[in-house]
Structure formats: C-alpha cells, structure tokens
Amino acid sequence: MRTAKGAHSSAPPVASSNSALQAAGIDRAGTYVTNVVKQFKFEERGKRRIHQRPDARALRACRAWFDAELDVVAPEALVVLGATAGKALLGSKFRLTDQRGRPLESDLAPLVLATIHPSAILRERDSDARGRARASGGHLA
C-alpha cells in the first residue's frame, strides 16, 4: 500500500507483510499490493480506530476496481490476505482455515494462494503468541 505521497506505508500490517516478503526472498519492489475493498469503515474506541468488516454492498461496489487493477497488472501469482478478501474474490464457500497455503482453483491468476491477514498476527494478545504465529508461517502462504 502507498501513502498519499506515493511512499510505501509503514502501518504495522504493511510492515509485517514487508517482513514476510523479505523472509520469503521476494523483492517488495516487484510486488503490487492492493485492497479488495477501497473504503475504510471503523469504530472509534478512545484513540484507536477498530476496523469494521465490509458489508456485501461494499464488496460488490469495489469489485470492478479490483478487477480493473488485476487486468492492468496481470499478476503471475495472487496472494489473498484474510477471510474477507477470500470470500470477496473466491466466493462465499471459501474457508481460510481449510484453504490456507494451498493452490486454489481460480481465474484470477495462474497461481492463487490464501493466507491470514498480517493484522491477525498483530491482534494476538501477547508477544509469545505473535512469535508462535510468525514462526508457523502465520503470514506466509
């Protein structure tokens, strides 16, 4: 993801994704990162903004933009991060727990994989749990 000024974002989930790419030997400069849903809904809790899951209407509304990006980029591989993106792109029967890390049947790209979203690791309650999730390849497909 990029900031308004075009620089790569340093938000914690993005930094976690960048670390995962580096650990996998993938050059970040050769990747294209986007979101299925282009809007950000949240609930304020004190100084924090808690992300809200997009509804079906938002998923449908944003799909055309995603498909247009996919047409332009024409990726060799597509890694779907998280259950929400998986359901939006692969259908309502998609189950991340069952399909994570395996090649998936899809017309989106020659190779399609799904894994957990990096923010899921960041939501772990303590550093030991986050370490275990990372060690198990938690943010790698």
Image (cartoon, helix red, strand yellow):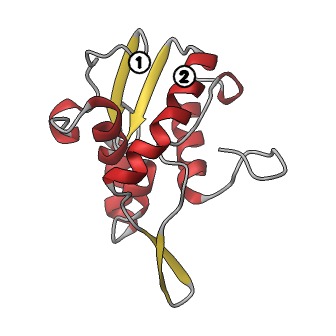
Q: Nearer the viewer, residue 100 or 105?
A: 105
Label 1 – label 2 distance at C-alpha: 8 Å
Q: Percent position (x, y) of residue 136?
A: 30, 41
SS state under label 2: helix
Q: Percent position (x, y) of residue 42?
A: 47, 72
Displayed quadrant of residue 19: top right
Q: Residue at x 38, y 57 (%)?
A: 54
Residue reaching furthest to the right: 5
The answer to whether the residue labelled 1 contacts the one labelled 2, judged by CB atoms less than 8 Å apart, is yes
Mark 2 packing: few (<14 Cα in 10 Å), some, or many (20+)?
some
Along the horizontal axis of the image, is 14 left or right of 82? right
The residue tagged 2 is 70
Amino acid of disc 1: Leu
The residue tagged 1 is 108
Whether 21 is drawn above or below 43: the answer is: above
Amino acid of disc 2: Leu
Along the horizontal axis of the image, is 84 left or right of 78? left
Image quadrant where one finds the N terminus: top right
SS state under label 1: loop
Q: Residue at x 59, y 27 (%)?
A: 69
